[in-house]
Image (cartoon, coloured by chain):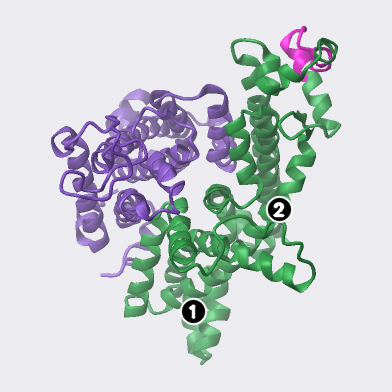
Chain colours: A green, B purple
């Protein structure tokens, strides 16, 4: 019983600490989103809505917006008005797309989720298996080849990898389409539509999977090597377990842990990778939307994307923190 | 901390390869005006030429010599890389070591802010800021530095915490040494190898980010940059100019980043001594 009590205290401290972290991160994001346009020289409405909006705006509507954002009032009241609008789920209005920002982003989100989800799944599975195999036979030819190959791959800038694939399979071999997520105006439905989507998805997913793969692989391999030295591995071997059970059930499972813990660090790579890959393949997800918004100086969309991506990332980290102690009870005392 | 970083890097083949690549890139960047046959920004009417003796890699869409731009692009990449590396390692040392030595509430505040920054992906912050500020190369370097010291600070703090408990520091303290003196005289010198690793990884991140942002068209369009060259080249991918425009640029950028990755990986046992011997041969 004595052992259980400090355990529980540690656990509480861990979640409190993380809660503070996420709150700070969230406040930083809000502050950046709120302050940047308002600190810019000139009319803050231009900075909030972009040049294009002001031309289309009637004086009455302008007056309404100034009141809505409390722009004629002190900064604190402005921040209050900003938060109020945010909690009502309002991200602003994009004049370029003539639609609410939330609708513009939601329209693009499924493509990004499809692309990132598939690539994450593939790269994690592949990375863990390759990492386990490589670590298991450390120093062998297979290990050496995998390590050098994937480490070089890790050094490849995300967007160059995509370009190389695009040029080989799209431009030169004409095997896969060059851009987009669907054949435009083809009017496909049913199975042909699914096949069309998959055909467009293939190259971006391949590029992104390769981008994510190296990180997972290197982490798994490194942990595998330290895990193999643990006394419990010796015990397992002494019990006469088969190679496969030793490799996957005993060493492999423990080597997967850092892949989960380091999600917070990897998430940066996930977001950047998705952004660049979408750009290279003109894949119509949130990354491409960001790029278009940058070109047209569509500030509400940039702000909206920033907020939504940041919240997504925080949530992902939060979920990992919640579930991690279940995967590895040692975490509770690790801090 | 009796780890010989030089030996660590020299003994691994990856480390040696990385060092050689980096040295080549640094020499190209330093000697750029001597190596490049043309002014990289000089436009001419002879656009989109195929490689020839006078233009080794041909010319781009506005008639600039691609080889010269490639050579000068190394300057931008490495300048941003080393600049950000220095500033962010400096910030990491200041905040990491002071957090470890001062402790208490100050330590808590610093570490929570560090954690908060680590969970926010750098690229979206830079995009948001860049959308408003249209950054010059100096502002870009500053921005990248401010966003990339946090990971290093965390590692340095952990290391400084364990050093703090060592005998020689307890001795120094018992002689009445001031905290600042202890940090300068005993802790920072012992952190040397870790600082180098942090420095290398900061450079790598910055080189990658600069290229990526230029590829998105966020950076100063006047500055010659590999990312921008790739962006221009990709928009002409329907012609076969990618062979001498896109590929060499991408290879130069990749080589630089791979070189830095190799050095960092070879030196990593410094941060994680358990990995010692994890490297093959």
Q: Are marks 1 and 2 in contact (CB under 8 Å)?
A: no
Q: Residue A7, can we see it? A: no
Residue at x 42%, y 75% (from the top left corner):
A134
- Magenta span has A73? yes
Where residue A213 appears, as percent x and y from the top left, is: 50, 63
**Residue A57 appears left or right of A144:** right
**Residue A195 appears left or right of B191:** right
Where residue B2 appears, as percent x and y from the top left, is: 26, 50
The local crowd at label 1, few if under 14, some if 14 to 19, many if 20 or more residues have their Cα within 10 Å, is: some
- Residue on which the image places disc 2: A319
Q: Earlier in the sequence, mark 1 or mark 2?
A: 1
Extreme residue toward the left, this view: B34
Residue at x 16%, y 37% (from the top left corner):
B37
Identify the element where label 2 is drawn: helix
Above-or-below relation of B153 to A169: above
Q: Are marks 1 and 2 on the same chain?
A: yes
Camera-side residue of A62 and A14:
A62
| Chain letter of the residue carrying label 1 | A
Where residue B277 appears, as percent x and y from the top left, is: 31, 67
Characterize the magenta stretch by its predominant secondary structure.
helix
Identify the element where label 1 is drawn: helix
Q: Which residues are magenta?
A: A65-79
Residue at x 66%, y 65% (from the top left corner):
A327
- Magenta span has A85? no
- Foreground mark, 1 or 2, reads 2
Q: Mark number for residue B126?
A: none
- Residue on which the image places disc 1: A233
């Amino acid at each position: 019983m004595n052992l259980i009590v400090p355990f529980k205290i540690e656990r509480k401290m861990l979640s409190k600490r993380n809660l503070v972290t996420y709150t700070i991160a969230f406040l930083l994001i809000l502050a950046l989103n709120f302050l940047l346009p308002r600190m810019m020289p000139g009319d803050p409405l231009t900075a909030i809505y972009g040049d294009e909006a002001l031309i289309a705006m009637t004086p009455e509507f302008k007056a309404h917006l100034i009141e809505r954002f409390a722009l004629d009032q002190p900064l604190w009241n402005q921040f209050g008005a900003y938060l109020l609008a945010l909690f009502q789920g309002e991200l602003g209005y994009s004049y370029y797309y003539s639609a609410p920002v939330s609708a513009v982003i939601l329209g693009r989100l499924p493509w990004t989720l499809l692309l990132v989800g598939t690539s994450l799944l593939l790269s994690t599975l592949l990375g863990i298996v390759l990492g386990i195999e490589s670590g298991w036979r450390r120093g062998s030819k297979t290990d050496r080849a995998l390590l050098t190959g994937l480490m070089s791959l890790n050094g490849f800038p995300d967007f160059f990898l995509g370009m190389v694939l695009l040029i080989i399979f799209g431009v030169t071999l004409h095997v896969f389409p060059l851009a987009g997520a669907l054949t435009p105006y083809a009017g496909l439905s049913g199975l042909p539509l699914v096949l069309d989507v998959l055909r467009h998805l293939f190259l971006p997913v391949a590029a992104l999977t390769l981008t994510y793969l190296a990180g997972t692989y290197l982490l798994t391999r490194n942990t595998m090597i330290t895990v193999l030295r643990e006394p419990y591995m010796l015990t397992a071997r002494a019990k006469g377990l088969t190679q496969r059970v030793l490799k996957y059930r005993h060493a492999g499972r423990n080597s997967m842990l850092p892949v989960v813990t380091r999600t917070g660090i990897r998430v940066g790579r996930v977001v950047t990778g998705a952004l660049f890959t979408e750009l290279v393949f003109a894949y119509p997800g949130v990354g491409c939307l960001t790029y278009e918004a940058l070109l047209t100086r569509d500030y509400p969309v940039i702000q909206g994307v920033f907020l939504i991506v940041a919240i997504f990332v925080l949530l992902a980290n939060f979920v990992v923190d919640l579930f991690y102690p279940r995967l590895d009870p040692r975490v509770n005392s690790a801090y | 901390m009796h780890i010989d970083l030089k030996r660590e890097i020299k003994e691994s083949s990856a480390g040696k390869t990385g060092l050689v690549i980096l040295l080549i890139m640094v020499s190209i960047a330093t000697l750029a005006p001597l190596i490049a046959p043309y002014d990289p920004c000089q436009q001419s009417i002879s656009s989109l030429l195929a490689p020839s003796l006078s233009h080794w890699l041909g010319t781009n869409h506005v008639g600039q010599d691609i080889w010269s731009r490639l050579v000068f692009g190394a300057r931008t990449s490495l300048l941003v890389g080393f600049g950000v590396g220095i500033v962010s390692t400096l910030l990491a040392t200041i905040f990491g070591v002071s957090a470890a030595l001062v402790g208490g509430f100050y330590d808590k505040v610093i570490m929570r802010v560090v954690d908060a920054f680590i969970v926010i992906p750098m690229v979206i912050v830079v995009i948001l800021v860049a959308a408003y500020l249209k950054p010059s190369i100096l502002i870009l370097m500053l921005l990248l530095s401010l966003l990339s010291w946090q990971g290093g600070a965390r590692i340095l703090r952990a290391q400084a915490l364990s050093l703090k408990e060592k005998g020689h520091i307890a001795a120094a303290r018992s002689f009445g040494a001031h905290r600042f003196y202890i940090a300068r005289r005993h802790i920072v010198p012992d952190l040397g190898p870790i600082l180098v690793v942090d420095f290398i990884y900061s450079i790598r991140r910055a080189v990658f980010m600069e290229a990526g942002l230029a590829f998105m068209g966020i950076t100063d369009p006047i500055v010659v940059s590999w990312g921008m060259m790739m962006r221009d080249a990709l928009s002409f991918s329907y012609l076969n100019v990618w062979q001498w425009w896109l590929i060499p640029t991408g290879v130069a950028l990749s080589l630089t980043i791979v070189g830095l990755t190799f050095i960092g990986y070879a030196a990593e046992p410094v941060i994680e001594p358990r990995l010692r011997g994890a490297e093959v041969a």
